[in-house]
Amino acid sequence: MRPLSDTIARLSRLSRRPPFPSDALPTRLGDLRNFGSNPGGLSAKIYAPAEPPKSPALAVVLHGCTQTAAGYDGCAGWSKYAEEYGFYVLFPEQRRANNANLCFNWFEKGDTVRDQGEAMSIRQMIETLATKWKIDRKRIFITGLSAGGAMANVMLATYPEVFAGGAIIAGLPYGAASTIPQAFDRMRGQGVPDRNRLQNLIREAAPTLTTWPSISVWHGTKDDVVSALNATAIIEQWRGVHGVDGSSPTVTTDDGVVRQVWHNESGQAVMSYHSIAGMGHGTPVDASNERENSGPFMLDVGLSSTSEIAGDWGLTPSFERRPPSTQGQQGQTGDLAPPTAPNLVSGIKQAIEDALRAAGLMK
C-alpha cells in the first residue's frame, strides 16, 4: 500500500485538473427527478428519442471523474445515436457533495453493495424509467469510463439480472478496493486481488442469482491513470461465471486495436477485451464522426467505442460496426471473410437504409 502522503499528493493533482468543458457543447439531456429514495444522493439526466419504438432498449452511461453527464454525452454521442436508432439513455450523475472530483464511489462499500448507496440509486433510476417508458427488460445495458467504468462493473456484479450486457472503459474490478489509498494502489495496478478472490467477489455480490450479462472491456495500452492490468483483472473476474475459464479467445487486429472474444459452449460471445495501442486514459471516440467530439479523457483515436458498443448490443444496425481485420493474432479461431470494398459497403448500407425508410422503420 502506498503511504498516506502519496495518496494526498494524488488527490491534490486530481483536484487541479481543468473542469470538463460541458458548457462548450449544448446539452440534449433532460432531468430525471423523483426516482426513489436515492440513498446515494445522485442526480440523473435522460434522453428520450422523439419517436421511440415499442419495447425500446435502455443504455445506462456513467461519466468519469471531473466529468458531467452532459459533457460526456457531448463527446461520446450517446444521445445522438439514441435519437437516430430509437433507444433511451440514462445518465446517472455524481454530485460534489458525495465526491469533490465527481467520481462515482466505486471503492466505498456502502455504495457498492446491492440495495445500498449509489448502486441502489442507479437501480432506482433504471426501474423508474423501465416502468415509465415500458423498456424491454431484456435490453438494458450499462457502460462507463474510469470511475464510471468501475461503477458500471459494480452494477453488473450486484444486479446481474437487470442487464443484458455491459462495457467497462478504463475501469477496475469489482470489490478490488475499499479505501481511498487502496483505490489509488489498484489504479496503479498494485495489490490487485488474484483470480480466485476476484471471481469469489462476483459470486458473493448477488449469491442467489445465476443470470450473467455479457461483458466487454476497453483499455488503452498507454493509460497512465488506470493501469491496463485492471482490464486483465476484470476479464479474469468474469471468466468463471461465464464458464470460459479454460477457453482461448478468438483474436483479431484492426488499426492497432486487438480484440479478444470468448465464446461459451453454445457459441455465444459472452466476453471481449479491446486493447487500443498507444491510447491513454479515456474513452475512444472518432471525431470525424458527426455524432462525436474529442475532449479531456475523450480521446480521438479514430475509433468510436460508442458505435461498436451499441452495435454489439444490437442497438444499431450491424453495418455501423467496423469489420475485423483478416490479420489475426496467435489464438485466432474460425474463418474470417475478406474485407469488403468500401464502395460496396456504402452501396449495401444505402440499399438497406432505403428499404427501412420505405417500410417506415427508419427516418
Image (cartoon, rainbow, N blue to C red):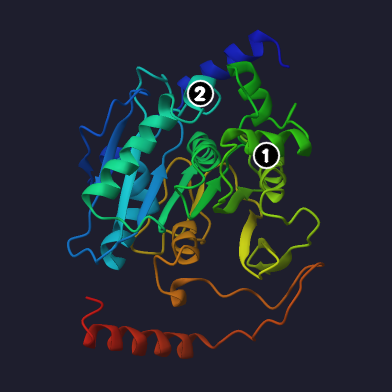
Q: Residue at 52% x, 45% y: name it.
A: 160
- Looking at the rendered structure, the kind of residue marked 1 is Asn
Q: How many marks?
A: 2
Q: Check the image and report above or below for 308 versus 240.
A: below
Q: Badge 1: few (under 14), some or many (20 or more) residues near its Cα, within 10 Å?
A: many
In which quadrant of the rendered image does the N terminus lie?
Answer: top right
Which of the marked residues, 1 or 2, is nearer the chain's N terminus?
A: 2
Q: Nearer the viewer, residue 120 or 101?
A: 120
Position in image of residue 11 (x %, y %): 54, 17
The structure residue drawn at horizontal position 76% and vertical position 74%, both measured from the top left corner, is: 333
Secondary structure at badge 2 equals helix
| Residue 226 position by quadrant | top right
Do the CB atoms of the residues marked 1 and 2 lie less than 8 Å apart?
no
Q: Relative to residue 165, is residue 182 drawn left or right?
A: right
The answer to whether any part of residue 283 appears in the image is: yes
The spot of residue 269 in percent (x, y) is 62, 65
- Residue at left offset 63%, top offset 38%: 202
Q: Looking at the image, which is closer to me, 319 or 197?
A: 197
Residue assigned mark 1 = 230
Mark carried by residue 14: 2
Residue 66 visible in the displayed image: no
**The C terminus - image quarter:** bottom left
Height in image: 295 above or below 113?
below
Residue at image coords 31%, 26%: 38
Q: Is residue 324 left or right of residue 128?
A: right
Measured from the top left, where is residue 176 in percent x and y?
65, 29
In the foreground, 249 or 349: 249
Q: Position of residue 359 (x, y in %)?
A: 23, 86
Check disc 2 and give the amino acid type. Answer: Leu
Task: Check the image and name the residue furthest to the front.
Answer: 208
Give the alpha-carbon distance from disc 1 to disc 2, as whole Å: 20 Å
